[in-house]
Image (spheres, rainbow, N blue to C red):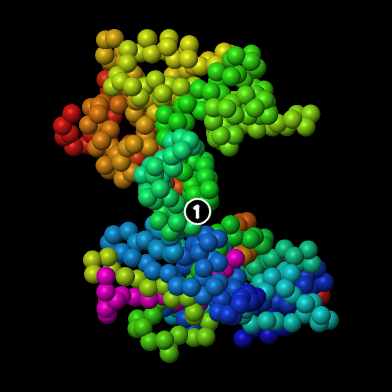
Amino acid sequence: MRTLEEVRATLEIAKLKEEDLQKTIHCLSFGDNVSSADYCLMELDDTLCKHIEAGQSLVIRGDKDERAVLCSGDNTYDLKIADTSNLLLFVPGCRTPDQLTNSQDSSHVAHTQIWGFCNSYWELRKHRPKLKKLKKILMENPYEGPAIRGQEENTENRVKYTMEDLLERIQASEEEIKTHLETIHACQIDGYWRVLDFDYEMKLLGHVTQLVDSESWSFNKVPLQNSLEELAPLEPKEMIEHCLNCYGKRYNENDKVFYALHEDKVCRGVALMLLQNAVKFNLREFQEVWQQSVPEGMSTRLDQLKSVALVDRTSRPETICLLRVEDLPEDTLERFNHLFTLREKWTEDDITPYIQDLCGEKQTTGALLTKYARSSMQNGIKVFNSRRPVAT
Amino acid sequence: MEKRGSVDGSSPPEWLLVELQGEVITRHNSGLAGNVMGDLLYTKEGVPVLIVGHHILYGKQVKLEKPFAVLTKHSSHSQDSLGSHDNSVITQVPMETNQQGPTSTSYSVSALIKRKLIFKTRPKPIITNVPKKV
Protein backbone atom coordinates (compact mmCIF):
# COMPACT_ATOMS: atom_id res chain seq x y z
CA MET A 1 0.00 0.00 0.00
CA ARG A 2 1.27 3.41 -0.89
CA THR A 3 2.69 5.45 1.92
CA LEU A 4 2.47 9.18 2.45
CA GLU A 5 6.14 9.52 1.49
CA GLU A 6 5.54 7.79 -1.83
CA VAL A 7 2.58 10.06 -2.48
CA ARG A 8 4.62 13.15 -1.63
CA ALA A 9 7.30 12.03 -4.06
CA THR A 10 4.68 11.72 -6.78
CA LEU A 11 3.36 15.18 -6.01
CA GLU A 12 6.82 16.62 -6.33
CA ILE A 13 7.39 15.00 -9.70
CA ALA A 14 3.98 16.19 -10.84
CA LYS A 15 4.92 19.70 -9.66
CA LEU A 16 1.96 19.96 -7.34
CA LYS A 17 2.46 21.86 -4.11
CA GLU A 18 1.10 20.22 -0.99
CA GLU A 19 0.01 23.60 0.40
CA ASP A 20 -2.29 24.09 -2.64
CA LEU A 21 -4.10 20.86 -1.90
CA GLN A 22 -6.63 19.63 0.59
CA LYS A 23 -5.34 17.34 3.31
CA THR A 24 -7.01 14.08 2.29
CA ILE A 25 -5.42 12.15 -0.54
CA HIS A 26 -7.29 9.13 -1.82
CA CYS A 27 -5.07 6.31 -3.09
CA LEU A 28 -7.29 4.36 -5.41
CA SER A 29 -6.75 0.67 -6.03
CA PHE A 30 -8.87 -2.02 -7.58
CA GLY A 31 -10.86 -4.21 -5.20
CA ASP A 32 -11.24 -7.95 -5.49
CA ASN A 33 -14.66 -7.79 -7.07
CA VAL A 34 -13.74 -5.75 -10.13
CA SER A 35 -13.13 -8.53 -12.58
CA SER A 36 -16.28 -10.48 -11.91
CA ALA A 37 -19.08 -9.92 -14.36
CA ASP A 38 -21.78 -9.95 -11.76
CA TYR A 39 -22.65 -6.30 -11.69
CA CYS A 40 -23.88 -3.59 -14.00
CA LEU A 41 -24.98 0.02 -13.99
CA MET A 42 -28.53 1.19 -14.68
CA GLU A 43 -29.68 4.74 -15.30
CA LEU A 44 -32.67 5.90 -13.25
CA ASP A 45 -35.20 8.67 -13.41
CA ASP A 46 -36.43 10.54 -10.32
CA THR A 47 -39.44 8.28 -9.84
CA LEU A 48 -37.40 5.09 -9.89
CA CYS A 49 -34.75 6.56 -7.66
CA LYS A 50 -37.34 7.40 -5.01
CA HIS A 51 -38.84 3.94 -5.48
CA ILE A 52 -35.49 2.32 -4.73
CA GLU A 53 -34.75 4.63 -1.83
CA ALA A 54 -38.03 3.54 -0.32
CA GLY A 55 -36.90 -0.06 -0.60
CA GLN A 56 -39.49 -1.09 -3.18
CA SER A 57 -38.81 -3.75 -5.77
CA LEU A 58 -38.91 -3.71 -9.55
CA VAL A 59 -39.26 -6.34 -12.24
CA ILE A 60 -37.34 -6.68 -15.49
CA ARG A 61 -39.08 -8.72 -18.17
CA GLY A 62 -37.62 -10.05 -21.35
CA ASP A 63 -35.51 -12.62 -23.08
CA LYS A 64 -31.81 -12.40 -23.64
CA ASP A 65 -32.26 -11.55 -27.30
CA GLU A 66 -35.36 -9.43 -27.13
CA ARG A 67 -35.44 -6.04 -25.62
CA ALA A 68 -35.96 -6.00 -21.90
CA VAL A 69 -38.54 -3.84 -20.13
CA LEU A 70 -38.53 -2.60 -16.58
CA CYS A 71 -41.88 -2.44 -14.81
CA SER A 72 -42.43 -0.25 -11.83
CA GLY A 73 -45.83 0.65 -10.51
CA ASP A 74 -47.70 2.03 -13.44
CA ASN A 75 -44.70 2.85 -15.61
CA THR A 76 -42.98 0.72 -18.18
CA TYR A 77 -39.53 1.47 -19.49
CA ASP A 78 -37.54 0.01 -22.36
CA LEU A 79 -34.02 -0.99 -21.37
CA LYS A 80 -31.22 -0.43 -23.81
CA ILE A 81 -27.48 -0.79 -23.42
CA ALA A 82 -25.68 2.48 -23.95
CA ASP A 83 -21.98 2.37 -24.60
CA THR A 84 -19.82 5.19 -23.51
CA SER A 85 -16.27 5.68 -24.70
CA ASN A 86 -15.40 6.59 -21.13
CA LEU A 87 -14.48 4.40 -18.22
CA LEU A 88 -16.81 4.55 -15.25
CA LEU A 89 -15.41 3.58 -11.85
CA PHE A 90 -17.59 3.17 -8.78
CA VAL A 91 -15.87 4.06 -5.57
CA PRO A 92 -17.73 3.51 -2.30
CA GLY A 93 -15.40 5.17 0.14
CA CYS A 94 -14.46 8.24 -1.84
CA ARG A 95 -15.27 11.66 -0.46
CA THR A 96 -15.71 14.90 -2.34
CA PRO A 97 -14.33 18.22 -1.10
CA ASP A 98 -17.64 19.21 0.51
CA GLN A 99 -17.51 16.04 2.59
CA LEU A 100 -13.94 16.38 3.81
CA THR A 101 -13.55 17.68 7.30
CA ASN A 102 -10.05 19.08 6.82
CA SER A 103 -9.67 18.98 10.55
CA GLN A 104 -6.25 17.45 10.42
CA ASP A 105 -3.21 19.61 10.20
CA SER A 106 -1.19 17.46 7.89
CA SER A 107 -1.83 15.47 4.77
CA HIS A 108 -2.88 11.91 5.10
CA VAL A 109 -3.62 9.04 2.78
CA ALA A 110 -7.05 7.41 2.56
CA HIS A 111 -6.75 4.00 0.95
CA THR A 112 -9.86 3.63 -1.13
CA GLN A 113 -10.97 0.66 -3.15
CA ILE A 114 -12.60 0.78 -6.55
CA TRP A 115 -15.47 -1.67 -6.19
CA GLY A 116 -16.21 -2.02 -9.91
CA PHE A 117 -16.02 -0.39 -13.31
CA CYS A 118 -17.70 -0.54 -16.68
CA ASN A 119 -18.01 1.36 -19.93
CA SER A 120 -21.64 0.73 -20.64
CA TYR A 121 -24.88 1.02 -18.73
CA TRP A 122 -28.58 0.27 -19.07
CA GLU A 123 -30.46 3.27 -20.38
CA LEU A 124 -34.16 3.71 -19.68
CA ARG A 125 -36.72 4.95 -22.12
CA LYS A 126 -40.17 5.52 -20.77
CA HIS A 127 -43.07 4.14 -22.80
CA ARG A 128 -45.50 6.78 -23.87
CA PRO A 129 -48.54 6.76 -21.61
CA LYS A 130 -51.67 4.98 -22.82
CA LEU A 131 -54.13 7.84 -22.74
CA LYS A 132 -56.54 6.88 -25.50
CA LYS A 133 -58.44 4.83 -22.95
CA LEU A 134 -59.09 7.98 -20.94
CA LYS A 135 -61.29 9.60 -23.52
CA LYS A 136 -62.87 6.27 -24.32
CA ILE A 137 -64.11 5.62 -20.81
CA LEU A 138 -65.27 9.18 -20.33
CA MET A 139 -67.18 8.98 -23.62
CA GLU A 140 -69.26 6.18 -22.14
CA ASN A 141 -71.17 8.91 -20.41
CA PRO A 142 -70.64 12.34 -21.94
CA TYR A 143 -72.22 15.39 -20.38
CA GLU A 144 -74.99 16.69 -22.60
CA GLY A 145 -75.98 19.69 -20.59
CA PRO A 146 -77.99 20.24 -17.45
CA ALA A 147 -81.06 18.13 -16.84
CA ILE A 148 -84.24 19.47 -18.40
CA ARG A 149 -86.47 20.93 -15.72
CA GLY A 150 -88.48 18.23 -14.05
CA GLN A 151 -86.32 15.37 -15.25
CA GLU A 152 -83.24 13.88 -13.66
CA GLU A 153 -80.19 13.64 -15.85
CA ASN A 154 -81.09 10.36 -17.50
CA THR A 155 -77.70 8.85 -17.09
CA GLU A 156 -77.88 8.17 -13.37
CA ASN A 157 -77.02 4.52 -13.85
CA ARG A 158 -74.03 5.07 -16.08
CA VAL A 159 -70.54 5.10 -14.66
CA LYS A 160 -68.85 8.30 -13.60
CA TYR A 161 -65.17 8.65 -12.68
CA THR A 162 -63.33 10.61 -10.06
CA MET A 163 -59.59 11.31 -10.38
CA GLU A 164 -58.87 8.34 -8.12
CA ASP A 165 -60.92 6.10 -10.39
CA LEU A 166 -59.03 7.38 -13.41
CA LEU A 167 -55.63 6.81 -11.80
CA GLU A 168 -56.58 3.22 -11.17
CA ARG A 169 -57.75 2.50 -14.67
CA ILE A 170 -55.34 4.46 -16.84
CA GLN A 171 -51.68 3.49 -17.31
CA ALA A 172 -50.25 6.96 -16.86
CA SER A 173 -49.16 9.33 -14.12
CA GLU A 174 -51.51 11.86 -12.51
CA GLU A 175 -49.69 14.68 -14.28
CA GLU A 176 -50.13 13.01 -17.68
CA ILE A 177 -53.80 12.39 -16.97
CA LYS A 178 -54.44 15.99 -15.89
CA THR A 179 -52.78 17.33 -19.03
CA HIS A 180 -54.79 15.02 -21.23
CA LEU A 181 -58.06 15.94 -19.50
CA GLU A 182 -57.35 19.54 -20.41
CA THR A 183 -56.63 18.56 -24.00
CA ILE A 184 -59.96 16.77 -24.38
CA HIS A 185 -61.83 19.68 -22.72
CA ALA A 186 -63.01 17.56 -19.81
CA CYS A 187 -64.33 19.28 -16.72
CA GLN A 188 -65.29 18.36 -13.20
CA ILE A 189 -69.00 18.25 -12.51
CA ASP A 190 -70.05 17.27 -8.98
CA GLY A 191 -66.57 15.86 -8.36
CA TYR A 192 -66.64 13.61 -11.41
CA TRP A 193 -64.58 14.17 -14.54
CA ARG A 194 -66.79 14.43 -17.62
CA VAL A 195 -66.19 15.05 -21.29
CA LEU A 196 -68.76 17.13 -23.05
CA ASP A 197 -70.94 15.69 -25.73
CA PHE A 198 -69.59 17.22 -28.95
CA ASP A 199 -72.85 18.90 -29.96
CA TYR A 200 -73.19 20.42 -26.51
CA GLU A 201 -69.64 21.72 -26.61
CA MET A 202 -70.31 23.29 -30.00
CA LYS A 203 -73.53 24.78 -28.68
CA LEU A 204 -71.61 26.49 -25.87
CA LEU A 205 -68.97 27.74 -28.30
CA GLY A 206 -71.72 29.01 -30.60
CA HIS A 207 -73.31 30.99 -27.75
CA VAL A 208 -69.97 32.59 -26.94
CA THR A 209 -69.01 33.47 -30.52
CA GLN A 210 -72.46 34.86 -31.34
CA LEU A 211 -72.36 36.99 -28.21
CA VAL A 212 -68.91 38.33 -29.15
CA ASP A 213 -70.21 39.28 -32.60
CA SER A 214 -73.48 40.82 -31.42
CA GLU A 215 -71.74 42.90 -28.73
CA SER A 216 -68.96 43.83 -31.18
CA TRP A 217 -66.32 42.88 -28.65
CA SER A 218 -62.79 42.21 -29.82
CA PHE A 219 -62.28 38.46 -29.60
CA ASN A 220 -59.13 39.23 -27.65
CA LYS A 221 -61.07 40.97 -24.91
CA VAL A 222 -64.15 39.00 -23.95
CA PRO A 223 -65.37 40.10 -20.51
CA LEU A 224 -66.19 37.17 -18.25
CA GLN A 225 -68.80 38.88 -16.07
CA ASN A 226 -70.82 40.24 -18.99
CA SER A 227 -70.68 36.91 -20.79
CA LEU A 228 -71.95 35.06 -17.76
CA GLU A 229 -74.78 37.54 -17.25
CA GLU A 230 -75.88 37.54 -20.88
CA LEU A 231 -75.72 33.79 -21.31
CA ALA A 232 -77.01 32.74 -17.87
CA PRO A 233 -80.57 32.25 -19.16
CA LEU A 234 -79.27 29.78 -21.73
CA GLU A 235 -76.62 27.70 -19.97
CA PRO A 236 -75.12 27.13 -16.49
CA LYS A 237 -72.44 29.70 -15.64
CA GLU A 238 -69.88 26.96 -14.91
CA MET A 239 -70.30 25.64 -18.44
CA ILE A 240 -69.90 29.07 -20.03
CA GLU A 241 -66.75 29.63 -18.02
CA HIS A 242 -65.49 26.14 -18.92
CA CYS A 243 -66.02 26.90 -22.60
CA LEU A 244 -64.06 30.14 -22.27
CA ASN A 245 -61.24 28.26 -20.51
CA CYS A 246 -61.08 25.69 -23.29
CA TYR A 247 -61.09 28.14 -26.15
CA GLY A 248 -59.37 31.16 -24.69
CA LYS A 249 -56.78 32.50 -22.33
CA ARG A 250 -57.84 34.14 -19.10
CA TYR A 251 -56.28 37.41 -17.92
CA ASN A 252 -56.90 40.33 -15.59
CA GLU A 253 -57.09 43.98 -16.49
CA ASN A 254 -58.16 46.74 -14.12
CA ASP A 255 -59.57 44.17 -11.70
CA LYS A 256 -61.80 42.68 -14.38
CA VAL A 257 -61.44 39.21 -15.86
CA PHE A 258 -61.20 38.87 -19.64
CA TYR A 259 -60.55 36.08 -22.11
CA ALA A 260 -58.54 36.23 -25.30
CA LEU A 261 -60.15 33.69 -27.56
CA HIS A 262 -57.64 31.46 -29.25
CA GLU A 263 -58.08 31.88 -32.97
CA ASP A 264 -56.74 28.44 -33.91
CA LYS A 265 -58.82 26.60 -31.32
CA VAL A 266 -62.05 28.37 -32.22
CA CYS A 267 -61.53 27.89 -35.96
CA ARG A 268 -60.69 24.24 -35.42
CA GLY A 269 -63.83 23.76 -33.29
CA VAL A 270 -66.04 25.36 -35.93
CA ALA A 271 -64.42 23.24 -38.66
CA LEU A 272 -65.07 20.06 -36.68
CA MET A 273 -68.68 21.07 -36.31
CA LEU A 274 -69.03 21.53 -40.08
CA LEU A 275 -67.11 18.38 -41.04
CA GLN A 276 -69.07 16.12 -38.72
CA ASN A 277 -72.07 16.21 -40.96
CA ALA A 278 -70.82 14.57 -44.14
CA VAL A 279 -68.23 12.09 -45.31
CA LYS A 280 -66.43 14.50 -47.62
CA PHE A 281 -66.73 18.12 -48.58
CA ASN A 282 -65.83 20.05 -51.65
CA LEU A 283 -62.73 21.85 -50.36
CA ARG A 284 -63.48 25.25 -51.83
CA GLU A 285 -67.08 25.29 -50.62
CA PHE A 286 -65.97 24.16 -47.20
CA GLN A 287 -63.38 26.92 -46.92
CA GLU A 288 -65.98 29.58 -47.78
CA VAL A 289 -68.56 28.38 -45.28
CA TRP A 290 -65.88 27.90 -42.65
CA GLN A 291 -64.56 31.44 -42.91
CA GLN A 292 -68.07 32.83 -42.70
CA SER A 293 -68.86 30.80 -39.61
CA VAL A 294 -66.02 32.00 -37.40
CA PRO A 295 -66.16 35.21 -35.32
CA GLU A 296 -65.50 38.53 -36.98
CA GLY A 297 -61.79 39.18 -37.21
CA MET A 298 -60.64 35.56 -37.07
CA SER A 299 -58.92 33.95 -40.05
CA THR A 300 -59.28 30.34 -40.99
CA ARG A 301 -56.26 28.42 -42.31
CA LEU A 302 -55.98 24.81 -43.37
CA ASP A 303 -52.98 24.21 -41.14
CA GLN A 304 -55.24 24.78 -38.13
CA LEU A 305 -56.75 21.42 -39.05
CA LYS A 306 -53.61 19.31 -38.88
CA SER A 307 -54.37 15.96 -37.24
CA VAL A 308 -58.14 16.50 -37.38
CA ALA A 309 -58.89 16.76 -41.10
CA LEU A 310 -57.36 15.40 -44.27
CA VAL A 311 -57.26 17.25 -47.58
CA ASP A 312 -57.21 15.29 -50.82
CA ARG A 313 -55.48 17.30 -53.51
CA THR A 314 -55.47 14.51 -56.05
CA SER A 315 -59.22 14.34 -56.50
CA ARG A 316 -61.16 16.69 -58.80
CA PRO A 317 -62.65 18.69 -57.20
CA GLU A 318 -60.33 18.73 -54.20
CA THR A 319 -61.99 17.49 -51.05
CA ILE A 320 -61.63 17.54 -47.28
CA CYS A 321 -62.88 15.07 -44.71
CA LEU A 322 -62.78 14.58 -40.98
CA LEU A 323 -59.90 12.42 -39.73
CA ARG A 324 -58.98 12.80 -36.11
CA VAL A 325 -55.79 11.26 -34.81
CA GLU A 326 -57.52 10.45 -31.52
CA ASP A 327 -59.88 8.12 -33.42
CA LEU A 328 -56.99 6.10 -34.82
CA PRO A 329 -55.41 2.94 -33.35
CA GLU A 330 -52.93 3.52 -30.57
CA ASP A 331 -50.54 0.72 -31.47
CA THR A 332 -47.85 1.90 -33.89
CA LEU A 333 -48.12 -0.92 -36.41
CA GLU A 334 -51.92 -0.85 -36.40
CA ARG A 335 -51.84 2.92 -36.87
CA PHE A 336 -49.64 2.68 -39.96
CA ASN A 337 -51.78 -0.11 -41.40
CA HIS A 338 -54.91 1.95 -40.88
CA LEU A 339 -53.40 5.04 -42.48
CA PHE A 340 -52.21 3.10 -45.52
CA THR A 341 -55.64 1.54 -45.85
CA LEU A 342 -57.17 5.01 -46.02
CA ARG A 343 -54.67 6.24 -48.54
CA GLU A 344 -52.02 4.29 -50.41
CA LYS A 345 -49.35 6.96 -50.59
CA TRP A 346 -48.74 9.82 -48.20
CA THR A 347 -46.46 12.82 -48.33
CA GLU A 348 -44.45 13.48 -45.20
CA ASP A 349 -46.40 16.70 -44.53
CA ASP A 350 -49.72 14.89 -44.64
CA ILE A 351 -48.75 11.88 -42.55
CA THR A 352 -46.66 13.55 -39.84
CA PRO A 353 -49.60 14.95 -37.80
CA TYR A 354 -51.03 11.43 -37.67
CA ILE A 355 -47.90 9.75 -36.30
CA GLN A 356 -46.46 12.49 -34.10
CA ASP A 357 -48.03 11.08 -30.94
CA LEU A 358 -46.43 7.69 -31.56
CA CYS A 359 -42.95 9.00 -30.94
CA GLY A 360 -41.35 7.85 -27.73
CA GLU A 361 -38.70 9.80 -25.90
CA LYS A 362 -35.94 10.88 -28.27
CA GLN A 363 -37.73 9.43 -31.28
CA THR A 364 -38.58 11.36 -34.44
CA THR A 365 -41.35 10.89 -37.00
CA GLY A 366 -38.57 10.42 -39.56
CA ALA A 367 -37.30 7.41 -37.64
CA LEU A 368 -40.80 5.95 -37.47
CA LEU A 369 -41.27 6.40 -41.21
CA THR A 370 -37.98 4.69 -41.91
CA LYS A 371 -39.02 1.77 -39.77
CA TYR A 372 -42.67 1.33 -40.71
CA ALA A 373 -42.96 2.65 -44.24
CA ARG A 374 -41.26 2.50 -47.58
CA SER A 375 -40.49 5.65 -49.52
CA SER A 376 -40.55 6.37 -53.22
CA MET A 377 -40.65 9.41 -55.50
CA GLN A 378 -43.86 10.49 -57.17
CA ASN A 379 -43.89 13.54 -59.44
CA GLY A 380 -40.72 14.76 -57.83
CA ILE A 381 -42.15 14.50 -54.31
CA LYS A 382 -41.16 11.92 -51.72
CA VAL A 383 -44.10 9.73 -50.72
CA PHE A 384 -44.50 6.91 -48.23
CA ASN A 385 -46.41 3.70 -48.60
CA SER A 386 -46.86 0.51 -46.69
CA ARG A 387 -44.11 -2.05 -46.38
CA ARG A 388 -46.60 -4.81 -46.98
CA PRO A 389 -49.51 -5.18 -49.40
CA VAL A 390 -52.57 -3.47 -47.97
CA ALA A 391 -56.09 -3.61 -49.34
CA THR A 392 -57.35 -0.11 -50.00
CA MET B 1 -19.87 8.23 1.52
CA GLU B 2 -23.30 9.51 2.33
CA LYS B 3 -26.12 7.33 3.49
CA ARG B 4 -29.57 8.62 2.67
CA GLY B 5 -31.90 8.12 5.60
CA SER B 6 -35.45 7.06 4.90
CA VAL B 7 -38.27 6.06 7.19
CA ASP B 8 -37.49 2.37 7.25
CA GLY B 9 -33.76 2.90 6.71
CA SER B 10 -33.63 0.53 3.80
CA SER B 11 -32.22 2.91 1.22
CA PRO B 12 -29.03 1.71 -0.49
CA PRO B 13 -25.81 3.65 0.22
CA GLU B 14 -24.55 6.34 -2.09
CA TRP B 15 -21.26 5.84 -3.90
CA LEU B 16 -19.18 8.13 -6.05
CA LEU B 17 -18.57 7.69 -9.76
CA VAL B 18 -15.22 8.52 -11.29
CA GLU B 19 -15.35 8.90 -15.05
CA LEU B 20 -12.22 8.78 -17.22
CA GLN B 21 -11.59 9.04 -20.88
CA GLY B 22 -9.87 6.04 -22.35
CA GLU B 23 -8.89 2.79 -20.72
CA VAL B 24 -6.73 2.05 -17.78
CA ILE B 25 -3.83 0.00 -18.96
CA THR B 26 -1.99 -2.14 -16.52
CA ARG B 27 1.56 -3.19 -16.97
CA HIS B 28 0.87 -6.64 -15.71
CA ASN B 29 -1.52 -8.93 -17.44
CA SER B 30 -2.48 -10.50 -14.20
CA GLY B 31 -5.71 -8.57 -14.00
CA LEU B 32 -6.65 -5.49 -12.10
CA ALA B 33 -7.67 -6.74 -8.68
CA GLY B 34 -5.39 -5.44 -5.98
CA ASN B 35 -3.53 -3.08 -8.29
CA VAL B 36 -3.03 0.55 -7.52
CA MET B 37 -4.86 2.81 -9.93
CA GLY B 38 -3.73 6.27 -8.96
CA ASP B 39 -3.90 9.13 -6.49
CA LEU B 40 -6.90 11.39 -6.22
CA LEU B 41 -6.34 14.84 -4.76
CA TYR B 42 -8.33 18.03 -4.48
CA THR B 43 -6.97 21.52 -4.79
CA LYS B 44 -7.92 24.07 -2.15
CA GLU B 45 -10.55 25.33 -4.62
CA GLY B 46 -12.04 21.85 -4.79
CA VAL B 47 -10.79 20.87 -8.24
CA PRO B 48 -10.20 17.11 -8.37
CA VAL B 49 -6.81 16.01 -9.70
CA LEU B 50 -5.95 12.45 -10.63
CA ILE B 51 -2.45 11.13 -11.05
CA VAL B 52 -2.43 7.87 -12.99
CA GLY B 53 0.91 6.42 -13.96
CA HIS B 54 2.70 9.15 -15.85
CA HIS B 55 -0.36 11.26 -16.40
CA ILE B 56 -1.99 14.02 -14.50
CA LEU B 57 -5.64 14.72 -15.16
CA TYR B 58 -7.76 17.63 -14.02
CA GLY B 59 -11.48 17.15 -13.57
CA LYS B 60 -14.62 18.52 -12.02
CA GLN B 61 -17.43 17.39 -9.78
CA VAL B 62 -20.82 17.07 -11.44
CA LYS B 63 -24.27 16.16 -10.18
CA LEU B 64 -25.74 13.47 -12.43
CA GLU B 65 -28.81 14.44 -14.40
CA LYS B 66 -29.98 10.85 -14.12
CA PRO B 67 -28.74 8.90 -11.13
CA PHE B 68 -27.36 5.40 -11.52
CA ALA B 69 -28.09 2.22 -9.62
CA VAL B 70 -25.30 -0.35 -9.19
CA LEU B 71 -26.97 -3.72 -9.68
CA THR B 72 -25.39 -6.91 -8.40
CA LYS B 73 -26.51 -10.16 -9.86
CA HIS B 74 -27.57 -13.03 -7.66
CA SER B 75 -27.91 -16.53 -9.00
CA SER B 76 -30.14 -17.81 -6.25
CA HIS B 77 -33.12 -16.33 -4.47
CA SER B 78 -31.69 -16.97 -1.07
CA GLN B 79 -32.24 -13.88 1.04
CA ASP B 80 -29.44 -14.90 3.40
CA SER B 81 -26.80 -14.25 0.82
CA LEU B 82 -27.83 -10.63 0.44
CA GLY B 83 -25.92 -8.08 2.44
CA SER B 84 -27.61 -5.58 4.69
CA HIS B 85 -27.38 -2.89 2.01
CA ASP B 86 -28.99 -4.93 -0.69
CA ASN B 87 -32.63 -4.25 -0.18
CA SER B 88 -34.21 -3.41 -3.47
CA VAL B 89 -34.61 -6.57 -5.45
CA ILE B 90 -34.94 -6.46 -9.20
CA THR B 91 -36.14 -9.71 -10.67
CA GLN B 92 -35.57 -10.60 -14.27
CA VAL B 93 -38.42 -12.68 -15.59
CA PRO B 94 -38.29 -14.40 -18.98
CA MET B 95 -41.16 -13.27 -21.14
CA GLU B 96 -42.41 -16.62 -22.34
CA THR B 97 -42.94 -18.29 -19.05
CA ASN B 98 -44.23 -16.12 -16.28
CA GLN B 99 -42.69 -18.32 -13.66
CA GLN B 100 -39.73 -17.55 -11.52
CA GLY B 101 -37.90 -20.79 -12.03
CA PRO B 102 -34.18 -21.51 -12.05
CA THR B 103 -34.01 -19.45 -15.24
CA SER B 104 -34.81 -16.15 -13.57
CA THR B 105 -32.09 -13.88 -12.33
CA SER B 106 -32.40 -11.37 -9.59
CA TYR B 107 -30.43 -8.23 -9.00
CA SER B 108 -30.15 -6.17 -5.91
CA VAL B 109 -29.29 -2.53 -5.78
CA SER B 110 -25.91 -2.32 -4.08
CA ALA B 111 -25.67 1.43 -4.30
CA LEU B 112 -27.03 4.60 -5.80
CA ILE B 113 -24.79 7.06 -7.60
CA LYS B 114 -25.85 10.68 -7.80
CA ARG B 115 -22.59 12.51 -8.34
CA LYS B 116 -19.45 11.96 -10.34
CA LEU B 117 -15.95 13.24 -10.77
CA ILE B 118 -15.31 13.52 -14.47
CA PHE B 119 -11.83 13.78 -15.91
CA LYS B 120 -12.20 14.90 -19.45
CA THR B 121 -9.22 17.07 -20.09
CA ARG B 122 -6.40 15.46 -21.95
CA PRO B 123 -3.98 13.92 -19.50
CA LYS B 124 -0.78 15.85 -19.19
CA PRO B 125 2.23 13.62 -19.13
CA ILE B 126 4.50 13.96 -16.14
CA ILE B 127 8.08 14.35 -17.17
CA THR B 128 10.08 12.28 -14.79
CA ASN B 129 13.64 12.84 -15.78
CA VAL B 130 13.81 16.34 -14.42
CA PRO B 131 16.94 16.74 -12.44
CA LYS B 132 16.13 17.19 -8.79
CA LYS B 133 17.20 20.44 -7.18
CA VAL B 134 20.08 20.00 -4.92
Q: Residue at point 37% right, 73% down?
A: B91
Q: Is residue B102 magenta?
A: yes
- A316 relative position to A74: left or right: left
Is residue A230 depicted above or below A48 in this figure? above
Q: Is residue A219 above or below residue B62?
A: above
Within the image, what quadrant is residue A217 found in? top right
In percent of width and height, residue A265 lies at 51, 27
**SS label for mark 1:** helix
Few, some or many residues within 10 Å of mark 1 (<14, 14–19, 20+) = some
The kind of residue tagged 1 is: Met
Which residue is nearer to you in this view: A300 or A30?
A: A300
> Which image quadrant for residue A100?
bottom right
Give the magenta-colored segment's residue range. Answer: B98-114
Query: Residue B32, can we see it?
Result: no
The residue lying furthest to the front in this view is A150
Viewer-nearest residue: B18 or A377: A377
Q: Is residue A371 above or below residue A260?
A: below
At x 47%, y 17%, the residue is: A301
Q: Residue at 44% x, 64% y: name it.
A: A73
Q: Position of residue B90 (x, y in %)?
A: 41, 72
Q: Picture coordinates of residue A64 (x, y %)?
A: 29, 65
> Picture quarter containing residue B54?
bottom right
Letter of the chain that mark 1 sits on in the rendering: A
Where does the N terminus of chain A fall, quadrant-wise? bottom right
Residue in the foreground of this view, choosing between B44 and A183:
A183
Q: Which residue is mark 1?
A: A163
- Residue at image location 39% in from the left, 28% down from the top: A308
In the rendered image, residue A159, in percent from the top left (x then y), is placed at: 39, 51
Does residue A108 show up?
A: yes
A77 inside magenta stretch? no
Q: Quadrant of the C terminus of chain A?
A: top left
- How many numbered badges does the structure rendering display? 1
